[in-house]
Amino acid sequence: MSFKNIAEGIYYFDGAVNIGYVHKGTTGLLIDAGIDRSAVKKVIRYIEDNGMPLTHLFISHAHADHYGGAAFVREKYEVETWAPALESAIIENPVLEPLYLFGGNDPFPDVRNKFLEGPPVTIDIVVEEGTVHIGDIEAEVTILPGHSYRQATLTIDGVLFAADAYFGTEYLHKHRIPYITDASIQIDTLRKLLNVDAKGAIPGHGTYEEDYSSTVEKNIEYHEKLLTWVKSFIQENGEVSHEELVSAMCTAYEVEVTKIPAWLLYRTAVTAYVNGLIREGIVRSFLKDYKLTFALSTD
């Protein structure tokens, strides 16, 4: 993990999941907290060694790799903790993620792991979109769903902390089928990002760029390519069950999945592209032989 100072009082800690830090006046704001205490400990050590405060924590969304270290931060510091609506409910009750990924059934024991369920965290302030004051820091909150239901980004002094609203291109190709919840909504979010007034952006996974529009455009192109694949596969096969589609897409993109928790994430990711096509009226869903089935719309 490396520590990068990108503007006066604005830093990010470059790791598997980027963690932001902003210092202004007596306020020290941590933006996300990594997957566990070992990740965030390195950040806290840097802050302490440089005599900077830690007074507030902003959690962008309720995925464990972004809030898993938050409970440790709250144990060590009396930080006021902020998170967006709905995401806050999951962060405070983290079993909800394994539950929804598992279709509402009690999840198998191996599904309840630190990658899907972080320690519970009390949220002090539930935030909505708009201008907020976090201690001495003025920030613009933008709600950008698609990867998570009410994911929030922060823009501070022209720097956009984008969370997982977009991915660095290397991460798109690394995961092959990136985790999103609805491709149509995700593409809308990406187009909205292109209009955010910022002088640079830090994604949750990737590197800081002053001109990040090219990376956002590549995200749009990548999702559109996957939408085209799903549409073509359904068109070629006439009717496709949900499980057949998940299996075929993971096979086509050479996704290596051997464990149930990872498969649950990829099942959601694949379904996100069907969601997008259904939202656009291109694909319809129905039951056949007790199976969720997809076909092209007849309209």
Image (spheres, helix red, strand yellow):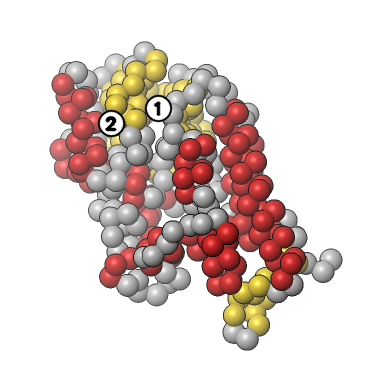
Number of callouts? 2
Residue type marked 1: His
Crowding around mark 1 (Cα neighbors within 10 Å: few <14, some 14 to 19, many 20+) is few
Q: Is residue 187 above or below residue 241?
A: above
Q: Residue at x 37, y 55 (%)?
A: 90
61, above or below 253, in the image: above
Determine the image quadrant of residue 45: top left
Badge nearest the viewer, 2 or 1: 2
Q: Is residue 124 visible?
A: no
| Drawn side of residue 231 relative to residue 122, left or right | right
- Percent x, y for residue 246? 55, 66
Q: Secondary structure at mark 2?
A: loop
Residue at image position (52%, 37%) is 169
Residue at the spot 48% in from the left edge and 57% down from the top edge: 255
Answer left or right for 217 relative to 161: right
For label 2, the residue is 1
Q: Work out how far the residue at label 2 is from the one at label 1, CA to CA, in angstroms.
A: 29 Å
Specify the farthest residue to the right. Answer: 299
Question: x and y percent of residue 63 in the render?
Answer: 38, 50
Residue 133: give its label. Answer: 1
Of the image marks 2 and 1, the number of the one nearer the N terminus: 2
Q: Residues within 10 Å of mark 2 (few under 14, many from 20)?
A: some
49 and 231: which one is in front?
Answer: 231
Q: Where on the picture, by quarter, is residue 93?
A: bottom left
Where residue 46 appears, as percent x and y from the top left, is: 21, 25
Q: Amino acid at mark 2?
A: Met
Q: Quadrant of residue 280?
A: bottom right
**Residue drawn 36% across the image and 39% down it:** 17
Q: Quadrant of the image for the C terminus?
A: bottom right
Q: Horizontally, is 134 left or right of 283 in the view?
A: left
